Amino acid sequence: CLGNNILPPCLIRSAFVRSSSSKTTTATTTTSTTIESIPQPTLEQLRVHYFANGLPMVGFGFVDQTVMIQAGNMIDCTFGVTFGLSTLTAAAVGGLISNLSGVIFGGTLENLAKA
């Protein structure tokens, strides 16, 4: 476990170790563990994983950026002119609105992607 790797192999393997049996004696308790071989995913499984997890993120990115640009433009053209706000301030508030909409509607986009 004392290698120079970012994630030592012993920590990676420990995530896949299952306790196969527990033997209890009167003096001590011992637990034996075995490392089960985990098969490589097939190409079809990787493809399904990509579409299930990757495409919703891309869709969310498009929606997030569209909301941010439109909200920033609307704020710049209305409140920015009325109150003398800078374009950067309008963009920051547009980003805030975009983040809020992402928190509120993020689950909806994920559910649409799963359908």
Image (cartoon, grey):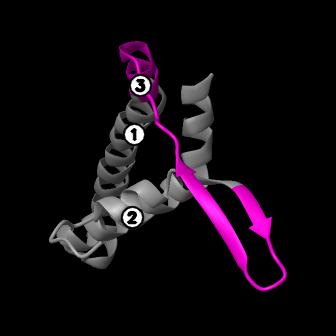
Check the image and report above or below for 57 versus 75: above
Magenta segment boundaries in residue numbering: 21-49
Instruction: Tell me where residue 2 appears, x and y as whole percent.
Output: 24, 76
Instruction: Tell me where residue 30 appears, x and y as whole percent.
Output: 68, 72
Judge the density around disc 3: few (<14), some (14-19), many (≥20) Cα neighbours within 10 Å: few
Q: Nearer the viewer, residue 46 or 65?
A: 46
Q: Is residue 17 visible?
A: no
The residue where tag 1 is placed is 57
Q: Please give the name of the residue rendered at 52% of the width and 41% of the height, measured from the top-left corner.
A: 36
Nearest to the eye among marks 3 and 2: give it. 2
Q: Please give the name of the residue rendered at 36% of the width and 15% of the height, measured from the top-left corner.
A: 43
Mark 1 / mark 2, whichever is N-terminal: 2
Amino acid type shown at disc 2: Leu
Q: Which mark is residue 93?
A: none
Q: Hey, which quadrant is residue 59 in on the image?
A: top left
The residue where tag 2 is placed is 11
